[in-house]
Amino acid sequence: MKLIQMALDGEASPEELEHVRQNLGNCLPCNRGYNLEKAIKQALQLRVEQKAVPQSLVDCIKSKIHEL
């Protein structure tokens, strides 16, 4: 499931993506898990409202990161 989640999030390597593709065709539980995770991700994306972040907050966060 972790690999499926990585694939859906765009975090999987090309080799991992190929493994997921091959496995989905052969494993019904994996296929169902993939479809469920994909549906959840799509539903969340529709529900999340994107708002602009004030530039002052962006600058503050960047300055804190550079201090580390």
Image: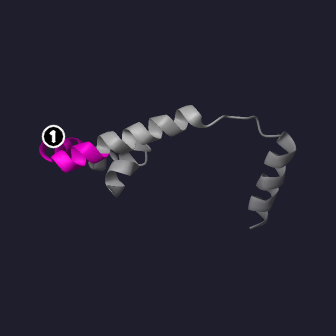
Q: Could you say which is closer to the camera, residue 55 or residue 63?
A: 55
Residue at 32%, 55% in the rendered image: 1
- Left or right position of 19 against 63: left
For the C terminus, the image quarter is bottom right
Q: Does the image show residue 52?
A: yes
Q: Of 39 and 1, which appears nearest the observer?
A: 39
Secondary element at tag 1: helix
Whole-percent x, y for residue 3 in the image: 33, 53
* Crowding at mark 1 (Cα within 10 Å: few <14, some 14-19, many 20+): few
The residue positioned 27% from the left and 48% from the top of the image is 15
Taking the magenta stretch, the answer to whether it contains residue 16 is no
User: Which residue in the protein does label 1 denote?
Assistant: 25
Residue 16 position (above or below residue 47):
below
Instruction: Name the spot of residue 65 as percent of width and height, x first.
Output: 74, 60
Q: Does the magenta stretch include residue 23?
A: yes
Q: Label the magenta part by its dominant secondary structure.
A: helix
Q: Where is residue 62 in the image (x, y as percent from the top left)?
A: 77, 53
Q: What residue type is labelled 1?
A: Gly
- 63 w.r.t. 39: above or below: below
- Write the start and end of the magenta stretch as one range: 19-33
Answer with the quarter of the image where residue 66 lies.
bottom right
Horizontal side of 14 relative to 47 (left or right) equals: left
Q: In this view, does 47 lie above or below 32?
A: above
Residue farthest bottom in this picture:
68
